[in-house]
Amino acid sequence: MTRPIPRPTSETEYFWQGCLQNQLRFQHCPSCDQPQFPPRIRCHSCHKDSLVWRESTKRGTVYSSTTVMRGPNKAFQDDTPYVIALIDLEEGFRIMANIVNADSLPVEIGTPIQIIFESVADQTALPQAKIIY
């Protein structure tokens, strides 16, 4: 069994293209000055459709994490255990990602991280997190 690969939509295509270029892109609403992630057609705060894309610094901190001891299906069985975290980015939005070096470093609330990208298919790269000190 192979791991699932994201399928870009018209709302998410620009985000996934950025991942291939080592860029973490997010939407920003100039009307209410709010960041938005994941991508949507309208602002989740003021509901206007005047969203613009911005590039993140890819730096943030762990908000919460959990260690997965048993994968959701056979495709993830060889990867266990692995750590998934909610990460607060400097720009004010939150993303969920695997922490790739969690086996050698402690993962605590507030741990600084850097988003990196893992190529998983010819035209797909996934955002992952790496603990930095």
Image (cartoon, helix red, strand yellow):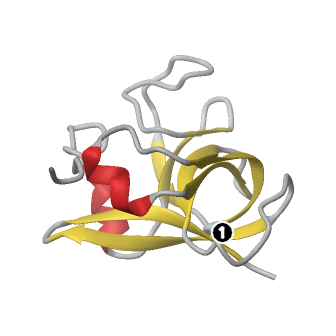
* Position in image of residue 101 (x %, y %): 61, 75
Residue drawn at (27%, 62%) of the image: 17
What secondary structure is found at the residue carrying circle 1? loop
Depicted 49 relative to depicted 2: above or below: above
Depicted 85 relative to depicted 124: above or below: above
* Position in image of residue 3 (x %, y %): 24, 52
Callout 1 crowding tier (Cα within 10 Å): few <14, some 14–19, many ≥20:
some
Residue drawn at (50%, 64%) of the image: 128
Image quarter where the C terminus lies is bottom right
Residue drawn at (52%, 26%) of the image: 43
Residue drawn at (70%, 54%) of the image: 91
Q: Which residue is mark 1?
A: 102
- Would residue 28 be seen by someone viewing this image from the given angle? yes
* Position in image of residue 130 (x %, y %): 62, 73
Q: Nearer the viewer, residue 89 or 14?
A: 89
Depicted 85 relative to depicted 17: above or below: above
* Position in image of residue 76 (x %, y %): 34, 52
